[in-house]
Image (cartoon, rainbow, N blue to C red):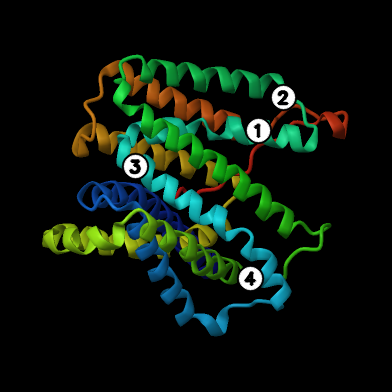
Amino acid sequence: MSKVSVEETVETMMSVTSFIFCSVSMIVFNKLVITAFPFESTLTALQMAFTVLVLLAAFPFLHIGSFRDALRWSLVAPCFAGGLLTAMLALKHCTLTLVIVVRALTPIFTLLAESFNNGCKVNRQELLSILIAVLGALLYTKELGFEHLVGVGWIFVNTCFSVLLRLLQRRMLAADQDPVDISKGGCSLINNAMGLLPLLATAYITGEFEEAPNQLALLSSQELIFMGISCVVAAAISYANIWCQSLISATSMLILVNLTRFLVILLDATLLHTDRLSTLQLLGALITVLGGMALAMPDSQPKEEPAAASYAPAKTSQEP
């Protein structure tokens, strides 16, 4: 094996490890922090502010083509902030496994949105994958209490924000639709900086500014460390995502996304215990993840007509 190939292999392994660590840490530490510090708007704003500071430190390496491009991309920021906030609300009211199960169903809504938007048809492979994912979700929720319904509602709202965010970003980055001339780091900076405004407004309206300082003073050293780690991971996950996607195939990336979901479910079942999973619930959760994975896989059947071609939902690994 040549020296170059060894370096490439090491870099790929490092990127994959970083991505898995950041993805799992993001959801786990957010769950731990929101349980101890139940002020979702303030917590999300802190993470976004930390990310802005990190990106500003790298400002010479960022690229924003024009003020017009920055204004156009700023339309994405409210959806970005809404996605992060609703994800935090879902973690506040749900167990980790429930969040993973419902998120595994996200490709279904993405598929339906893209089918409506582009006129694509759902093929047999996608229909079978949907049935598998829904079956797993039904097995998991069969023994679930009604107190989780509020949290499930926030997960669905988060899914809507995610789909809208993906559609907006795709439209603004499409090569045939006057794409914005902004680097990925520049897009992330605008998302976080502009997204802070509605979050701060929400925190003020809900009275978090008055209550959050007192709760912050009551946090233990361990809980403060968890909060600090969540901010670092929130800033790191964007880079880890881009780094990993630039080195491996889309299919490999999809495998990693679902591997992190399996790891979170296993951590919840064995160590974290945010919910006591029965064997049926654990089986249902794993089946749902497999169904969601199959749904997002590229269609292996030949496409005769472009208008009838199926759409494989875009794989995004950053789960707010």
Percent across and percent down for residue 32 are 24, 48
Q: Tell me which label, 2 or 1, sits earlier in the chain.
A: 1
Along the line of sight, which residue is nearer the eye, 180 or 34? 34
Tell me the residue at 41%/31% (across/down): 152
The residue depicted at 74 percent of the width and 32 percent of the height is 116
**Residue that label 1 marks:** 111
Decide: few, some or many residues near mark 2? Use Cα within 10 Å; few <14, some 14-19, many ≥20. some
Can you identify the residue that label 2 sits on? 122
Name the N-terminal-most of marks 3 and 4.
3
Q: CA distance from mark 3 to mark 1?
A: 24 Å
How many numbered circles are shown?
Answer: 4
Q: Secondary structure at mark 2?
A: loop
Residue type (three-letter) at the residue carrying disc 1: Leu
Q: CA distance from mark 2 to mark 4?
A: 34 Å
**Residue type indicated by callout 3:** Leu
Per the image, the residue denoted by label 4 is 183
Q: Give the vertical position of 320 relative to 106 (above or below).
A: below
Q: In this rendering, which labeled residue sits more in front, label 3 or label 1?
A: 3
Residue at the spot of label 3: 91
Say what amino acid the circle numbered 2 marks.
Val
Label 1 element class: helix
Disc number lying in front (3 or 2): 3
Q: Position of residue 37 (x, y in %)?
A: 23, 53
Mark before the other along the chain sequence, 2 or 4: 2
Residue extending furthest toward the bottom:
60
Q: CA distance from mark 1 to mark 4?
A: 27 Å
